[in-house]
Each structure stands twice: as C-alpha cells, then as structure tokens.
C-alpha cells in the first residue's frame, strides 16, 4: 500500500507545472522505477494519470498526456491495454473538435491519438487505437463540412445584402436633393 501512495504522489508531482509547461522529471523517473519493481501497480498508475488528464488546468492536462505517452512507450503492452480500457475514450473526447476543450488539450490529444494509431494500431490486440484515429478523422471532417456550409451561407447572405444594397441605392440616391420624402434635405419634396 505504501508503494501505491508513493506512486500517486509521484504522478501528482510529475504532472504539476514546474515552469515552462513541463512536469518534474525526477518524479517521472520515480514512476518508472516503481512500475518496474511493482508491475501490479500499472492499473493504479493509469488511474492516477487519468485523474490528472481530467484536471481543469489545461497545462496539467497536457503534461499528464505527455506522461501517459511516456509510460505507454516505457511499459509496453500491459499498460497500453489499460489505457485502452480506462483513458482512450477520454482522450478521444478531448481531441474531438467542438467539445469545448481548451485548444492546447485538443491539439495534444489529437496528436497522441494519431501517434498511438500509427504506433500501436497495427497490432490486432490494440486495434482500438486505429479505430479512435478513424473516429477522430470523421468528427474533424464533419466539423469541417459544417464550417464550410456556414461559410457558404454567409457568402450567400453577403451577396444578397450587396444586391439589396445596390437596389436600395438606386431607389434612394445619395444626393440631398433627390432624397425621398421624410429624409430631410433641400428640395426633396418635403
């Protein structure tokens, strides 16, 4: 139990911003040492990192995502499986555009999803990484199409407004003498 508490404290220290958007490197080394000595704590490590990924501070979230990526590279298949079960859906949600996530979190999550898909997605046992990248691509494409439709509608409205503006200009000349009744000006039939 003491090792689990030490692991939790190390994850916390590793994901606190020590300036410049980086965590405590010594704590990251501690986490690796603890997991090498006690591989049964992998699930606990994933749980603790997930809690830090969900932190409201975007800097902490980005640092936690970096830590998660480093742990996946260092501790292999077992940790990668736990990430699929516990963290991957959260990271995919954070990477999805239009979900209200800070841009730094969204960008980092999208990069990791794609990176994990290329690194681990070819393994049949880890196909969820490739599936997540496809889901992310579809959602980004959908958002892009929605934005394109909005731009097209706005352009059509602008064209309509330009035509209406020209029509009104023909009906309402700018010369003060030619203004219709009620708009003031000299000699306009007031």
Image (tube, rainbow, N blue to C red):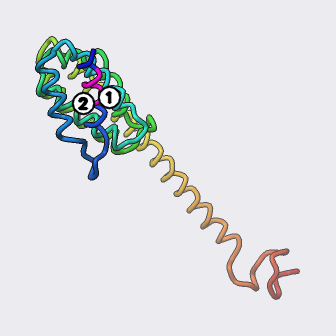
Label 1 environment density (alpha carbons within 10 Å; few <14, some 14–19, many ≥20): many
Q: Is residue 163 magenta?
A: no
Q: Residue at x 18, y 41 (%)?
A: 25
Coordinates of residue 77 in the picture (x, y in percent) = 13, 16
Image quadrant in which the C terminus is located:
bottom right
Q: Earlier in the sequence, mark 1 or mark 2?
A: 1
Q: State which quadrant residue 118 falls in.
A: top left
Residues in magenta? 5-10
Indicate left or right for 7 with 172 as reference: left
| Residues at discs 1 and 2 in contact (Cβ within 8 Å) | yes
Q: Residue at x 85, y 74 (%)?
A: 182
- The answer to whether 154 is drawn above or below residue 83 in the figure is below
Separation (CA) of disc 1 from disc 2: 8 Å
Magenta region, mostly helix, strand or loop? helix
Q: Which mark is residue 113?
A: 2
Q: Is residue 9 magenta?
A: yes
- The answer to whether 123 is drawn above or below residue 153 in the figure is above
């Amino acid at each position: 139990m003491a090792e689990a508490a030490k692991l939790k404290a190390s994850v916390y220290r590793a994901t606190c911003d020590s300036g410049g958007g980086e965590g405590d490197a010594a704590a990251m080394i501690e986490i690796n040492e603890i997991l090498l000595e006690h591989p049964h704590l992998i699930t606990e490590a994933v749980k603790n990192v997930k809690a830090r990924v969900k932190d409201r501070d975007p800097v902490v979230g980005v640092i936690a995502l970096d830590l998660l990526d480093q742990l996946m590279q260092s501790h292999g298949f077992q940790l990668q499986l736990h990430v699929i079960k516990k963290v991957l859906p959260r990271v995919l949600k954070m990477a999805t555009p239009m979900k209200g996530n800070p841009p730094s979190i969204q960008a980092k999550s999208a990069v990791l999803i794609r990176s994990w898909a290329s690194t681990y997605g070819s393994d049949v046992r880890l196909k969820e990484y490739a599936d997540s990248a496809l889901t992310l691509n579809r959602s980004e494409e959908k958002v892009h199409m929605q934005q394109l439709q909005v731009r097209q509608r706005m352009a059509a409205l602008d064209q309509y407004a330009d035509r209406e503006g020209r029509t009104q200009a023909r009906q309402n000349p700018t010369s003060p003498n030619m203004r219709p009744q009620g708009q003031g000006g000299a000699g306009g039939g007031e």
